[in-house]
Every structure is written in C-alpha cells, then in structure tokens.
C-alpha cells in the first residue's frame, strides 16, 4: 500500500506527526510505502534524508506533475493543523482515491468518515497511526468503494458549476445592495 503526502514540508502541515507515524507503521507493516512531495519550507532536510536512508519514506521534492504519483498511490494523508478548503484533498478525492486527513475545518469537509476516508486528531501521531492501520486493514474492495465514494462526493458537493453558481449568487446580492 502506498500513501502519498502532497504539501509543504513544514510543522503546520503535520509533517512531524506524519514522519513519526510512518516510522511506527513501517515497523509493523514493512511493505507499506510513504511518498512525500513538496517544498521543504522548514529545516527538515536532514530528517527526511535519514528516514529515506532507513527506507521509511521516499521524499521526491517539488514536483510539477503529481498525477503519476497519485495514480501509483492508494490513499493520501494530510495531517495539517489548519487549512482553508484543502485543494489537494479535493483533487485527490476527485481521482477516486481515499483521503486520510486531520479533523480540522477545511480537511474534514472533504471526506465522509468511514465512507470516503478516515479522519484523525491534528497534532496527534497516535491518532494518525490508528487511521492508517484502519485503512491498511480494510479489504481491497472496501478501499475501492471508499475511492468511488470520494469521487461521488466531489461531483455532488464540489463540482465547478456548483462553486461558480454560489459565487455568482453572492456577487448578485452585493450588486443589488449597491
């Protein structure tokens, strides 16, 4: 099973918890893979290098095209401490892949618990480990169903037309008030 993190390598994105969780998971499930993509915005270079040398993670740096990484992964993980609506989760779920994300506004809205993903407590590596293990231990068909449910949620709640119509409605309200 391959997990993918796409985001800035920084504390507020939950990178410490992710690296701790990956270390714990690899000890119990050596065939699980953790791929990380993104700019290193804080000084994590040495830690990433050490964990990569130990085979715990694979850090790919900044990538202009993440689609091939998404195609090769089974779920994404975003342990962020806070977000606006997390575009990376919306895009990931729209590809039909499950989401594992912290239960914070902007993340928790992008999946339905146990249906299209699993949530965990922000700033809590143990909670993240529990969510990862829950996903690992799902039967293959359940994982596929979770991805399909995520795609349907994106179509139902985040379709471009829905978003544009909501913006246009708000603009119309503002213009009428002027």
Image (spheres, helix red, strand yellow):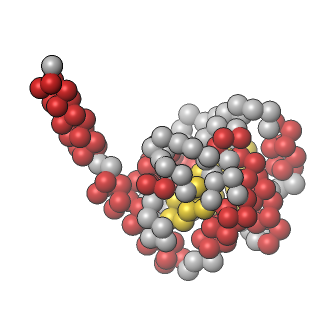
Residue located 68% across and 64% down the image: 127
**In the image, is residue 68 above or below residue 40?**
below
Residue nearest the viewer, comparing 25 with 178: 178
Using the rendered view, name the quadrant where residue 102 is placed: bottom right
- Where is residue 9? Give x, y as percent: 69, 39
Which quarter shows the C terminus? Answer: top left
Residue farthest top in this picture: 178
- Place of residue 87 in the rendered image (x, y in percent of width and height, measured from the top left): 46, 43
Q: Is residue 37 left or right of residue 169?
A: right
| Image vertical order of residue 54 relative to residue 177, above or below | below
Identity of the residue drawn at 20% across and 40% down = 165
Q: Which residue is painted at 44% across and 49% down in the image?
A: 90
Quadrant in which residue 75 is drawn: bottom right
- Evaluate whether residue 25 shows in this view: yes
Camera-side residue of 113 and 93: 113
Q: Is residue 11 above or below residue 137?
A: above
Image x and y of residue 78, in percent? 59, 51
């Amino acid at each position: 099973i391959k997990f993918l993190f796409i985001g800035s390598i920084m504390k507020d994105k939950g990178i410490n918890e992710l690296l701790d969780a990956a270390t714990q998971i690899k000890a119990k499930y050596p065939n699980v893979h953790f791929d990380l993509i993104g700019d290193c915005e804080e000084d994590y270079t040495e830690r990433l290098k050490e964990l990569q040398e130990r085979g715990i993670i694979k850090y790919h740096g900044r990538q202009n095209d993440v689609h091939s990484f998404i195609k090769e992964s089974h779920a994404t993980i975003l342990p962020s401490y806070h977000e606006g609506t997390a575009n990376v989760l919306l895009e990931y779920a729209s590809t039909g892949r499950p989401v594992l994300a912290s239960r914070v506004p902007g993340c928790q809205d992008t999946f339905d618990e146990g249906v299209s993903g699993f949530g965990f407590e922000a700033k809590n590596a143990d909670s993240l480990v529990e969510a990862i293990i829950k996903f690992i231990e799902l039967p293959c068909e359940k994982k596929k169903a979770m991805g399909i449910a995520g795609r349907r949620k994106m179509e139902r709640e985040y379709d471009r037309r829905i978003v544009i119509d909501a913006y246009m409605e708000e603009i119309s309200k503002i213009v009428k008030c002027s």
